[in-house]
Image (spheres, rainbow, N blue to C red):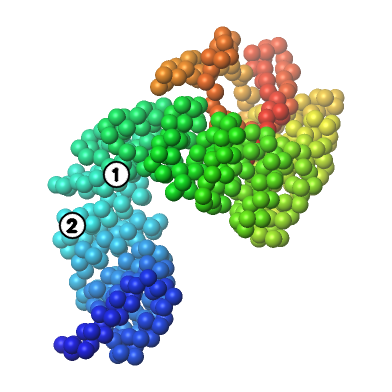
């Protein structure tokens, strides 16, 4: 039994461990309880290890643990929890095996973090073994353990097993329902997730946010916005996550009014000025809607900015063709001491492309690797190839692709091909199309392009070889398909959707009847630009004429939502 003096010292150490300056004084605290001969106290050590876990210092915690002579259940649980928070997750499983070898019986506080660690492992079989241990130990009815089991199966897509556990529960709180909904939606069963959502007797704001987000992610933006309206009608107050989720939906649907209402709500509830992600979402919303004046004003009024804030505004300027202003904003970002990341350079290189700033673009591509140690990715090279091509430096664009340290993709070769056709570089065009065929041997359009290049030069033997090659590879020419536009009503707005149909295209009578998708063109990967061409085929194959539309005029802009 500990003396009164020892108890006083122990309490003092515990207060130090949970104080505000623990991170800075962790080693001093450790030295202090060693001097007090408390380095074998499981009570002290379990708290110390727990603090190490929250500070992501599990290497230090492990050194302390290995020096313990007789670790008890408290210390093992603290170690397992620490690894479940920080990884490596397999260490938590190893500790559980060691605990059993010591003859220590697990409790609910063992299984909850252990199951969480298993969720982070790629091997679900280990999780199933731990679930078996839960059943043998009789802890399957404890709430925290049930959450762990559900998270284990739902995170790995094993929803049949998760459903069995869910059906066997007598009590299901909001967390349990949310886990099940997330599991089904992540697997692609959004309708089943929505059905479960409708069955919930009680919902939290997290429940609403999750379901709205899953609908939007599956492309059901109108339903997502309707669910947001339902949430408001039932008296739920949106939080910062709601605002960040719903604003991109409004941008996608072109619903400026709802977006502005959300902006007003964010202002009145002080979310806009207190939460950086809300300000970022507003900048993105107005940028995608073409309202740069408001986007810039929101950006300037943000009391705190992070790298995502700068990226979003720079990409918004690129999206709207204001390249020079985007480059100026990048310079301001650097002067303010904000360190750019790879997404920043995608945005500012896209700005250079729109403004035709060739030397600046080359300088930035060099700067990102030399000054910021960021290796260029395909997106960065894509921006640079596009910039060189637009400036007529087709040979330089080809040399850049050949000098890349990573494998170029079809988008890069397609961008080069477009420039080759524009500037009459037929030799390079032939090389580009051959690369496209190697990358996409199934794509008949690439064979068509090469055939047309040979036809333009009068190389008819080569044209015939391409046809033979297509037959050998069983590549068939795609039928020319036109689209019929059908008007549908969603949330009071009129939208047109394309329905493939082999008949004359039906277009709306008035251009203003169409509510545009203001996010169009915001993807990093631009369509592969190809020349306008029609393959000449014998009369009996006239119905199989392949037309290839020229996409070269479409700008390759950076993503407006870069972060």
Q: Residue at x 77, y 42 (%)?
A: 357
| Residue 442 shown left or right of residue 403 in the figure | left
Position in image of residue 517 (x %, y %): 53, 26
Q: Residue at x 19, y 71 (%)?
A: 105
Q: Give the residue number, with chain letter if any, for mark 1.
A: 178
Position in image of residue 338 (x %, y %): 60, 56
| Residue 16 shown left or right of residue 539 in the figure | left
| Residue 93 shown left or right of residue 264 in the figure | left
Tally the marks. Answer: 2
Residue 229 visible in the displayed image = yes
Q: Quadrant of residue 12?
A: bottom left
Q: Count residues near mark 1 (Cα–Cα under 10 Å), then give few for <14, some for 14-19, many for 20+.
A: many
Q: Is residue 50 above or below residue 375?
A: below
Position in image of residue 548 (x %, y %): 68, 23
Please, what secondary structure does the residue beneath circle 1 have? helix
Mark found first going from the N terminus, 1 or 2: 2
């Amino acid at each position: 039994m500990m003396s009164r003096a020892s108890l006083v010292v122990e309490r003092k150490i515990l207060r130090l461990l949970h104080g505000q300056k623990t991170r800075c004084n962790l080693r001093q605290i450790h030295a202090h309880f060693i001097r007090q001969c408390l380095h074998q106290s499981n009570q002290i050590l379990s708290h110390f290890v727990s603090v190490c876990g929250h500070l992501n210092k599990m290497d230090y915690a492990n050194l302390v643990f290995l020096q313990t002579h007789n670790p008890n259940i408290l210390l093992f649980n603290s170690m397992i929890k620490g690894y479940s928070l920080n990884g490596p997750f397999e260490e938590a499983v190893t500790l559980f095996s060691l605990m059993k070898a010591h003859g220590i019986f697990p409790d609910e506080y063992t299984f909850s973090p252990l199951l969480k660690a298993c969720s982070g492992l790629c091997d679900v079989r280990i999780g199933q073994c731990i679930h078996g241990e839960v059943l043998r130990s009789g802890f399957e009815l404890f709430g925290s353990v049930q959450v762990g089991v559900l998270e284990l199966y739902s995170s790995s897509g094993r929803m049949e097993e998760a459903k069995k556990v869910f059906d066997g529960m007598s009590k299901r709180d909001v967390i349990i329902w949310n886990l099940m909904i997330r599991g089904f939606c992540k697997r692609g069963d959004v309708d089943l997730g929505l059905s479960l959502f409708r069955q919930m007797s009680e919902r939290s704001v997290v429940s609403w946010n999750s379901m709205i987000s899953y609908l939007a992610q599956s492309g059901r933006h109108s339903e997502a916005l309707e669910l947001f309206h339902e949430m408001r009608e039932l008296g739920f107050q949106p939080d910062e996550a709601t605002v960040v989720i719903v604003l991109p939906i409004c941008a996608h649907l072109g619903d400026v009014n709802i977006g502005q209402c959300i902006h007003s709500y964010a202002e009145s509830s002080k979310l806009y000025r207190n939460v950086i992600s809300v300000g970022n979402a507003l900048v993105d919303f107005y940028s995608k809607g073409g309202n740069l004046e408001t986007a810039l004003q929101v950006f300037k009024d943000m009391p705190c900015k992070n790298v995502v804030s700068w990226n979003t505004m720079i990409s918004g300027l690129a999206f709207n063709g204001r390249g020079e202003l985007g480059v100026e904003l990048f310079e301001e970002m650097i002067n303010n001491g904000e360190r750019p990341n790879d997404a920043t350079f995608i945005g500012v290189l896209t700005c250079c492309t729109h403004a035709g700033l060739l030397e600046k673009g080359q300088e930035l591509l060099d700067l990102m690797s030399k000054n910021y140690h960021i290796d260029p990715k395909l997106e960065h090279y894509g921006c640079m190839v596009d910039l060189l091509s637009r400036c007529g430096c087709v040979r330089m664009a080809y040399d850049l692709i050949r000098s890349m340290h990573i494998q170029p993709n079809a988008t890069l070769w397609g961008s080069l091909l477009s420039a080759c056709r524009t500037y009459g570089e037929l030799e390079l065009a032939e090389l580009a199309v051959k690369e496209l065929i190697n990358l996409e041997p199934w794509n008949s359009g690439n064979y068509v392009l090469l055939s047309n290049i040979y036809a333009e030069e009068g190389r008819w033997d080569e044209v015939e070889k391409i046809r033979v090659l297509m037959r050998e590879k069983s590549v068939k020419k795609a039928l020319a398909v036109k689209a019929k536009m059908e008007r549908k009503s969603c949330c009071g707005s009129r939208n047109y959707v394309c329905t493939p149909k082999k008949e004359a295209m039906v277009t709306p009578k008035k251009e203003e009847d169409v509510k545009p998708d203001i996010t169009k063109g915001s993807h990093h990967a631009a369509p592969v630009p190809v020349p306008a061409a029609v393959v000449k085929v014998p009369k009996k194959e006239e119905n199989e004429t392949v037309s290839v539309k020229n996409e070269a005029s479409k700008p390759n802009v950076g993503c407006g939502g870069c972060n």
